[in-house]
Image (cartoon, rainbow, N blue to C red):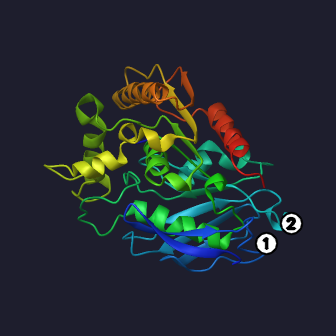
Amino acid sequence: MLSEHRLTRRSVLKSVGGISAAMALGGGGILAAASAASAADDGFGLRIKDRNESDPRMWYYRFATDAIGWDPGVNVLLPDDYHTSGRTYPVLYLFHGGNEDFITFDRLHAIRDLTAGKPVIVVMPDGGRAGWYSNPVNSNTGPRNWETFHIGQLLPWIEANFRTYAEYDGRAVSGFSMGGFGALKYAAKYYGHFASVSAHSGPASLRRDNNAVVHWANVSSAAVELAGGTIYGVPFWDQARVSADNPMERIDSYRNKRIFLVAGTSPDPTNPFDSLNETHVLAGQREFRARLDSVGIPHESYEEPGGHFVRRHLLERDINGVIDRLRKA
């Protein structure tokens, strides 16, 4: 959904779902890939075009990549003691919603404040204004392969340049709105990557209500991301791609994960954007939760008053839950 606001490691190349992702593996434990003072380097198809490492916690990068037709960026929010502790940390990949970017999302929701004193690295990448955390069927404005950028390039780049646990129990993914969908999609499609997944007002069912989310992904991406191109194709959809992305069709892929879901119960009836978005999110998450329950997959879920926005207290609860679930720093 669109948000209203606007080595020392042994590496193997593992192909998952058609995307080659470098997976860093350790023997008895994961060793640090980057020293406290080292600067990040190019790699995994990413060429650093701009950077700012002057802030002790927030390191910023912008890349040239063949996956995206412009230079996408990322904020890497480090723990307070990253430069002095020598410790290795779990990582939370935190995705923004539509019609905003990673910088706006971070500032709007004060992620720095929410993670102060917490032993976790938070990675907040660009995802496009309506990129839907996907490789589109077609684009009329150059490549916009966000899935390739995130999974095939950025994830291994982070693990090569920062002291992270490059393993299932070292990674979580969370997001708001369109980013919540991206989190649910990646956690299922790349099962071995993430031990925790969270969706804050993120749609969990692509095909319900006459395929409403598929239509919305196509319409919004055509309008603001792909210059008439679409995520799933028109007039005929790539049905295999829809099924691969649809959380409702990948239920077994959520086994043995921490699952955290949030939806609003009373969107503003005078605001069509808020009402349409959150009404569908709520219904889709209820359907998703019922399916999880039916096969005995536990989850943590919240329905709260209000519409389509990030609830700060639940985002903080989510971050604390991520830290509890993942391998400790």
Q: Name the foreground residue: 232 vs 60.
A: 232
Within-10-Å neighbours for mark 2: few <14, some 14–19, many 20+: few
Residue 171 appears in the rendering: yes
Furthest residue toward left:
235
Q: Secondary structure at mark 2?
A: helix
Residue 246 % position (x, y): 36, 43
Q: Amino acid at mark 2?
A: Thr
Residue 8 % position (x, y): 71, 77
Task: Answer with mark 1 or mark 2, whichever residue precedes in sequence.
Answer: 1
Q: Image point 81% across, 63% down: which residue?
A: 87
Quadrant location of the N terminus in the rendered image? top left
Q: Image point 42% across, 47% down: which residue?
A: 98
Within-10-Å neighbours for mark 1: few <14, some 14–19, many 20+: some
Q: Secondary structure at mark 1?
A: loop
Pointer 1 and pointer 2: residues touching (CB < 8 Å)?
yes
Residue 70 % position (x, y): 40, 70
- Asked where in the image residue 320 lies, by quadrant, the reply is top right
Residue under circle 2? 84
As drawn, is 76 to the left or to the right of 56?
Answer: left
Q: Image point 38% across, 36% down: which residue?
A: 248
Quadrant location of the C terminus in the rendered image? bottom right
Q: Image point 74% across, 60% down: which residue?
A: 57
As drawn, is 88 to the left or to the right of 229?
Answer: right
Residue under circle 1? 36
Residue 16, placed above or below residue 62: above
Residue 4 appears in the rendering: no
Q: Name the foreground residue: 29 vs 176.
A: 29
